[in-house]
Amino acid sequence: MSSNFHPDGTLFIVSGPSGAGKTTLINRVREQLEPIGITLYFSVSHTTRRARTGEIDGISYHFVPTAQFESMAARGEFIEWAFVHEQRYGTSKAEVLDRLKSGKDVILDIDYQGARQIAVDPELKPRSLNIFIFPPSFDHLEQRLHDRGLNSEDEIQTRLQKAADEIDAGKEFYDYVIINDDLNVAAECLKAAIIAKKLQTKTALEAITAMAERLKEERDGRFARGH
Ligand code: ADP
Ligand code: 5GP
């Protein structure tokens, strides 16, 4: 673990249109940051949509009936939730808050409506970073949605129709925008944004004070020993 990264919990929000490459980038970046001491816990969302083949409850999503989702929302158990492609999706407090409090970093893959809710939350905003993943072009987006093979032609057309509006609606609250053209370059950019934020949290007064105290103790110990 590198001592460069002060263990403040940060909430990394990755959003962008369906097919832009969020899942691919998050997986890659989590794997590549782990060896340098940044562990990103992936927050598993709740959704009312049905599981696709290969998706596992509790790992891909918490798949819940609409009534359960609604009562969770009514009890205030989500930090954000939204209708996305006619289904409900939400990030539960249970997935995020205790981890942040205990100094862990959490990464979310959510839509722009959820990102906006967090961007105006006075508690979460200061400890979060909003990153928007942008496709290189409309054609690329369409191609990727087809190649991924997860959605029907109708679903692909709905996702494409919404993409331009999502990009427009999100533009005022994103901290960083990354164009996912070449996957390696985009992954490097995402890592750079995350690392920069981790270094920035180190400048929090508390962290600097603790470090200054430690340095003073080390200095005093050394001089007391006559070096
Ligand atoms: P999202 O999570 O944003 O919906 P995915 O990560 O599932 O998007 O990516 C959609 C498809 O595009 C996947 O098949 C993925 O392998 C592919 N993909 C992602 N990034 C790139 C890229 N830079 N170049 C080419 N294909 C990509
Ligand atoms: P999919 O059903 O294809 O997995 O996801 C559809 C969209 O829902 C994606 O854009 C994804 O980012 C978004 N999404 C997933 N989880 C959440 C969540 O907890 N909250 C919000 N607002 N959007 C989510």
Image (cartoon, rainbow, N blue to C red):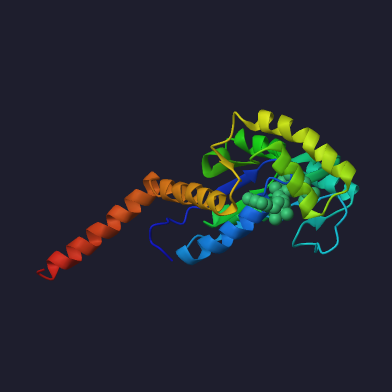
Q: Is residue 66 left or right of residue 192?
A: right
**Is residue 46 in sight in this rendering?**
no
| Quadrant holding the C terminus | bottom left
Picture coordinates of residue 41 (x, y %)? Answer: 61, 59
**Is residue 117 in sight in this rendering?**
yes
Q: Is residue 222 left or right of residue 35?
A: left
Picture coordinates of residue 46 (x, y %)? Answer: 78, 51
Q: Residue at x 68, y 29 (%)?
A: 169
Count of marks placed on residues: 0
Q: Identify which residue, 213 or 146, lies in the foreground.
A: 146
Snapshot quadrant of residue 54: bottom right
Residue lying at the far left in this picture: please name it: 226
| Quadrant holding the N terminus | bottom left
- Whether residue 73 is situated above or below residue 167 in the rendered picture: below
Picture coordinates of residue 172 (x, y %)? Answer: 59, 28
Q: Residue at x 28, y 55 (%)?
A: 213
Picture coordinates of residue 222 (x, y %)? Answer: 17, 67
Q: Residue at x 49, y 66 (%)?
A: 35
Q: Identify which residue, 209 or 117, lies in the foreground.
A: 117
Q: Residue at x 80, y 39 (%)?
A: 159
